[in-house]
């Protein structure tokens, strides 16, 4: 069983930055694709970014390309989401998710087996 714990959310002004972190329990982190999703009030959960378990492959939804960066530190069992140039429409609860071992990077929420509890990001002046 994998447990995921997110942190780093908060209130930030438009144009500001936040870095989300997600720490995973267990010994399989380095073999798991990871994703960040978000859900705004009244909207469906959507993928934000994903990173493969092997070196290199990442995915970003169009609305965050060139503003957000996903990365991972396998030595720390941690995946990050650096968010720059934040906009009010980025306001949502952000969730970290993990696929099963050796699963490929995916944009579908139903492809992920483990989820964190979420962290609130609010972008407002």
Image (cartoon, helix red, strand yellow):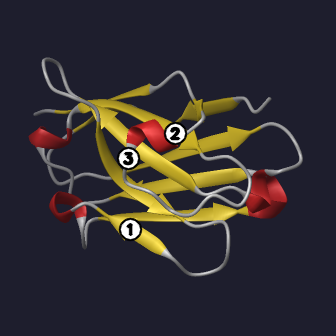
Q: Secondary structure at mark 3?
A: loop
> Is residue 125 toward the left or the right of residue 122 in the image?
left
Q: Secondary structure at mark 2?
A: strand
Quarter where residue 84 is shown:
bottom left
- Residue hosting label 3: 108
Q: Which residue is outermost to the bottom?
A: 56
Q: Residue 59, image x and y in percent?
A: 38, 68
Question: What's the CA distance linking mark 3 and mark 1?
Answer: 12 Å
Residue drawn at x 44%, y 37% is 110
- Say which label, 2 or 3, has the lower sequence index: 2
Q: Residue 47, image x and y in percent?
A: 32, 47
Q: Quadrant where the N terminus lies?
A: top right
Contact (Cβ within 8 Å) of mark 3 with mark 1: no
User: Does residue 122 show up?
Assistant: no
Q: Residue 39, image x and y in percent?
A: 27, 29
- Say which label, 2 or 1, has the lower sequence index: 1
Q: Secondary structure at mark 1?
A: strand
In the image, residue 83 above or below residue 112 = below
In the image, residue 13 above or below residue 93 = below
Residue drawn at x 19%, y 42% is 90
Contact (Cβ within 8 Å) of mark 2 with mark 1: no
Q: Which residue is outermost to the right?
A: 27
Q: Quadrant where the C terminus lies?
A: top left
Q: How many marks?
A: 3
- Residue hosting label 1: 59
- Residue hosting label 2: 96
Residue drawn at x 57%, y 28% is 116
Label 3, residues with CA under 10 Å away: few <14, some 14-19, many ≥20: few
Label 1, residues with CA under 10 Å away: few <14, some 14-19, many ≥20: some
Question: What's the CA distance linking mark 2 and mark 3?
Answer: 13 Å
Label 2, residues with CA under 10 Å away: few <14, some 14-19, many ≥20: many
> Is residue 92 toward the left or the right of residue 124 in the image?
right
């Amino acid at each position: 069983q994998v447990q995921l714990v997110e942190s780093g959310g908060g209130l930030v002004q438009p144009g500001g930055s936040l870095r989300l972190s997600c720490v995973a329990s267990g010994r399989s982190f380095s073999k798991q694709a990871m994703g960040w999703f978000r859900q705004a009030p009244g909207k469906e959960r959507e993928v934000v970014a994903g990173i493969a378990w092997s070196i290199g492959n990442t995915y970003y939804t169009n609305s965050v390309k060139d503003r957000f960066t996903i990365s991972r530190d396998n030595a720390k069992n941690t995946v990050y989401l650096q968010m720059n140039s934040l906009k009010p429409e980025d306001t949502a609860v952000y969730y970290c998710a993990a696929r099963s071992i050796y699963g490929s990077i995916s944009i579908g929420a139903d492809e992920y087996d483990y989820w964190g509890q979420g962290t609130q990001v609010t972008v407002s002046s």
